[in-house]
Amino acid sequence: MTYIVIGNCQDCRFTDCVEVCPVDCFYGDARMLYIHPDECIDCGACVPACPVEAIFPEADVPESESKWTAINIDICNDNLDSLENITEKSDALPTAEEKKKRLGF
């Protein structure tokens, strides 16, 4: 099992989660982060660090967000060369605070 980043991260890209990840399994594109399923050690440290509740254990991904399981796996397995390995906290996207409010956080 792995952890999955869902749509709450899209257009936010808060990186609080990468600071607590002991194995640097987060990758990102211009809009969001993804967790590489083969690198994640299932420690769960990232879950409470995410300010928009965008990270779930694979078995607990909400039904309405289930498409993100395949998206995380496919993007990390098929497009790893085009993603940046995110290992340090950086500024969130300019749209992050507005989306955080829309999500109710």
Image (cartoon, helix red, strand yellow):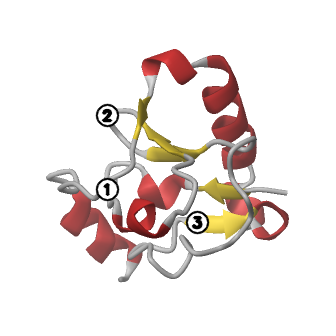
Drawn side of residue 53 relative to residue 78, left or right: left
**Position of residue 79 measured from the top left corner of the image (x, y, whole percent):** 57, 19
Residue 30: mark in rendering: 2
Quarter of the figure that contains the N terminus: bottom right
Q: Is residue 31 above or below residue 60?
A: above
Q: Residues at badges 1 and 2 in contact (C-beta under 8 Å)?
A: no
Looking at marks 3 and 1 on the same chain, the residue that comes earlier in the sequence is marked by 1
What amino acid type should be assigned to the residue bearing mark 1?
Answer: Cys
Task: Identify the secondary structure beneath mark 2.
Answer: loop
**Position of residue 19 measured from the top left corner of the image (x, y, whole percent):** 39, 65
Drawn side of residue 19 relative to residue 55, left or right: left
Task: Identify the secondary structure beneath mark 1.
Answer: loop
Alpha-carbon neighbours of circle 1 within 10 Å: few (<14), some, or many (≥20)? many
CA separation in Å, label 2 and label 3: 18 Å
Q: Residue at x 75, y 53 (%)?
A: 66
Residue 12: mark in rendering: 1
Tag 3 residue: 55
CA separation in Å, label 1 and label 2: 10 Å
